[in-house]
Amino acid sequence: MSSRVQPLEQGDPRSLSRYRVVGRLGTGGMGTVYAALGTSDERLAIKVVHPAHAADAEFRARFRREVQLSRRVAGPCLAAVHDADVEAPAPWLATAFVPGPTLNQHVASSGALAGARLYALAAGTAAALAAIHEASVVHRDIKPQNRTSTTTPPGPTAERPSSTANRWPALSSPTSVASPTSTVAASDTRPAGSG
């Protein structure tokens, strides 16, 4: 599937709804992202909320909103929403799987981007953010781990919007750190290098 896919660990699900889980893509503060195959062998990335968060009504409401926002967004360089179950005991969101390394994996293994690859990443990020902002959504969680670089369609990058608070203050605009509930679209440009 991809070199980013790691083996499943003991206790990981082998299926989620009608999807076959084939590996892990990563774990963060919100949950674990699994690589999965759909009924027609379509490749998916499924984010599953950690059990502690799933038991928190406020967090579950934020995740429900993230799914609603994600379904509103479509455009170039975005991983399309495929399915979700926000009422499951462990809520989850399935998006198209985007092959290729994350930006931080690429930099760690190959060094900084330059030339055409750098320009493609910047253009793809701008196109993704424009589509997200066109839907009146603010991403709020742009970081190297959320950027996938690929040479296959939909383009050089892939993103998904997020309604969760940005946990990376060094990459955040001063506005989003000072008032995370009133963040504006312009806040998404600081991590892209504007401030």
Image (tube, rainbow, N blue to C red):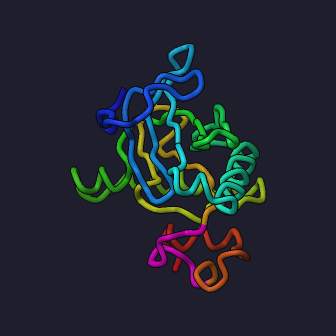
Q: Which secondary structure class fits the magenta region best?
A: loop
Residue 193 versus residue 154 in the image, above or below: below
Q: Residue furthest top?
A: 40
Question: Residue 42 location in percent, x, y?
Answer: 53, 21
Which residue occupies 28% across, 56% down? 107
Evaluate whether residue 123 shows in this view: no
Which residue occupies 44% across, 27% down? 21
Which residue occupies 55% across, 69% down? 166
Give the left or right position of residue 88, taking residue 24 as reference.
right
Residue 45 versus residue 123 in the image, above or below: above
Evaluate whether residue 90 shows in this view: yes
Magenta stretch: residue 125 in it?
no
Examine the image and state in which quarter residue 114 appears. bottom left
Q: Nearer the viewer, residue 86 or 81?
A: 86
Give the left or right position of residue 164, taking residue 69 as reference.
left
Q: Is the N terminus in the top left, top right, bottom left or bottom right quadrant?
A: top left
Question: Residue 73 location in percent, x, y?
Answer: 71, 46
Q: Nearer the viewer, residue 67 or 48?
A: 48
Residue 1 versus residue 107 in the image, above or below: above
Which residue occupies 60% across, 40% down? 93
Question: Residue 161 location in percent, x, y?
Answer: 63, 54
Give the left or right position of residue 40, taking residue 9 as reference.
right
Q: Which residues are magenta?
A: 165-174
Examine the image and state in which quarter residue 145 appears. bottom left
The number of numbered discs placed on residues in the rendered structure image is 0
